[in-house]
Amino acid sequence: MNTVANYDKTPTITVSSDPSECALGWDEVADRLRGFLPAGRCVLCIETYPGVFEREIEQALARRLRPVQILRSQCCYKPSAEINQIAAPFLTDDPVFGRMSYLELTDYIDPNRLAAARQTVSEWSRGLLLVIGTGAAVISPNADVLVYADLARWEIQQRQRRGQISSLGVNDAGAKPSVLYKRGFFLDWRLADNLKRALLPRINFLLDTNDMRTPKIISGEALHRALRKTVERPFRLVPFFDPGPWGGQWIRKVCALNGDAPNYAWCFDCVPEENSLLLGFGNRRMEIPAVDLVFTHPRELLGDAVHARFGAEFPIRFDFLDTMDGGNLSLQVHPTTEYIRSHFGLYYTQDESYYILDADQGAAVYLGLKDEVNPESMLRDLELAENPDCAFPADRYVNQFPAHKHDHFLIPAGTVHCSGRNCMVLEISATPYIFTFKLWDWGRLGLDGEPRPIHIDHGKRNIQWDRRTRWVKGNLLNQIQPLSSGEGWLEERTGLHEMEFIETRRCWFTGKIIHHTRGGVNVLNLVEGDEAVVESPGHAFEPFVVHYAETFVVPAAVGPYTITPFGSAQGKRCATIKAFVRTSA
C-alpha cells in the first residue's frame, strides 16, 4: 500500500485573490443583492435547484430585504396526486430503475395558477417582489434580478438520507432515501437541469446553498470567468466517500479520512453529474456542481467530436471500489446498449473496466462464465439463492482470476463480473452508473439491515452467455500493447475492449512525458508515484500538481501538456492511466 497520505480532498480552482468577490453569510449576501436591486419597483427571482432549503432562504432574505410580497413557485404546481400520475410512467414499479424523463418543469405547473402568478409579476408596480422556488424563473422570466440557488448532488443525497427534503411537487419526505434518489435521478434532476441550462448564461448571481449556515454568493460574471478559466486548464473535482456492505479500509488510510463510518466502499472523484467544483476567491471557496461546467462549456471541455456524439454530457467516469479487508462486491451484470435504450431511455450503457490500483494477498476478480456453464442451471441456482437459506455457488459458474497491482480487467456490458475482496479498484467506465443488475449479493444485508435489491429478471436478459473462460482470457485480461517509447517513458494501450467507446492508455515515466488531448477530453489518474506536475509547453496555464490516486481532467481545449515526476517522486518511476473517447478506428 502506498503510505503517502497526500490525497487532496478539497481541490480548489483559484479564480481570484480577492475574497470580496464571494460574499459570505446572509448579511453579506443580502448586502450584495441590495446593492444590485434597482430603486422603486423590483422583481427579485430566486430560482432553486430541487433539494435547496427554500424556506430558510426566504426567511433570511425577507428579514434583510423586506419584500412587499413573496410569490412561491410551489403555489403554482398541480396537486400532488396529479404530479404522481404524470411521474408514474417514468418511475415504474421497479424499486431501483425507472425511465429517463423527457418532461419539462412546466408539466408540473398548473396553467391557470401560472397565469395568475405571471399577472401579479407583470402588474407589479411598487417596492420589492420576491419570487422563489424551483420554477420561479418560469413565473418571472424577465425578473429584474435573477439568482440561481445551487446545490451539489452529494449534499442532496445527504438531505434525502436525513429525511430533510421531499421530491419536487409532492410531500414524500418520509420515504426511503432510495425512493427519493430514484425520483431525483429519473425525474426531478432532469427537469431542473433542463431549466438550469437555459438560465446559467444569464443569471446575475449564483448562490451556494450547500451549507445554510454560511451561504455564499458570487456574481454571474465571476461565475462565468471561473468556468472559462477552469476549462482552459487541468482540474480536479471534489471527491466524496461512502460506506457500503462490502467496503474496505484502503481509502480511509490513503485518503486520510476521519469519521466513524465502518468502511469506505466508494470514492467518487470524477462523476461530474455528482461531484462539485471548488472555486477560490482569496481565502473563500465557492462550491458549485461540476455539471455546471459541462452545461456552459461543453465543446471546450469535451471537444467537438465528443460533444457531437454525447451532447452536454460527460461520458467518462472514474471512481474507487475498495474491498481491502472488506468483502466481495455483488455479482452483477450491466445492460447492453439495446436493452438500456429500450427499457430505460438512455442511448449508451455502462461499459467499464477494473484497473487494480492496489491488491493484497488472495485478491481476485470474478469475470465471465466458465466454459462448461449451463445457462438454465445457473439461472435456477440464482433464483434459489433469493431464499436467504440458500447460497449461490459462484465458483461453479463464474471465472475467478488472481488480481495484482496494475492489472487491467475489461468489462464490456453483458459480462458477469465483480471485484473480490482485497482489491483496490480504479473503476473506469461510461457514465450511466446506476444501471447495475445484481445477481447475487453473497447472502448479506445492506448497511440499513435490509437485503439489497436483486435484479435477476433484468440480468438474465443481458448476460452474454458466450463470454466464457477462453474468450475472457483472450479478450478481457491485461490486453496490454506497447505503443511508443522514448528516453525515460513508455506508453501502452491497456483497453478497453473494441466494443467499448473508451480507450485507455498507461504511461510509465521517470522524466517529462508529452501528452495531447487531440481535440477530446482526457481523464487521468496518477496510479504510481507520490506526485507529479502537469504543465503547458506554451505556459497556457499554471503548473498543476497531482498526488497519488488523484483523478484529474484535462479539457479538450488544453491541447498539448506534459507530466513530470514532482517533489519526492523526482527521479522515480511514475505512471498515469488515461481515458478518452475513441473518435475514430
Image: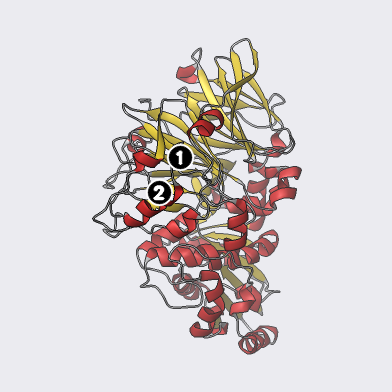
Q: Which residue is located at x 42 percent, y 69 percent?
A: 165
Q: Which residue is mark 2?
A: 378
Residues tagged 2 and 1 counted as in contact (Cβ below 8 A): yes
Q: Element under label 1?
A: strand
Colour convention of the picture? secondary structure
- Which quadrant would the N terminus be assigned to in this image? top left
Question: Where is mark 1, residue-wise?
Answer: 369
Q: Nearer the viewer, residue 384 or 304?
A: 384
| Position in image of residue 12 (x %, y %) | 52, 41
Residue 539 picture quarter: top right
Q: Amino acid at mark 2?
A: Met
Residue 222 seen by the camera: no
Q: Residue at x 71, y 44 (%)?
A: 306
Q: Position of residue 573 (x, y in %)?
A: 50, 16
Which residue appears farthest toward the top when viewing the image?
487
Q: Residue at x 44, y 48 (%)?
A: 332
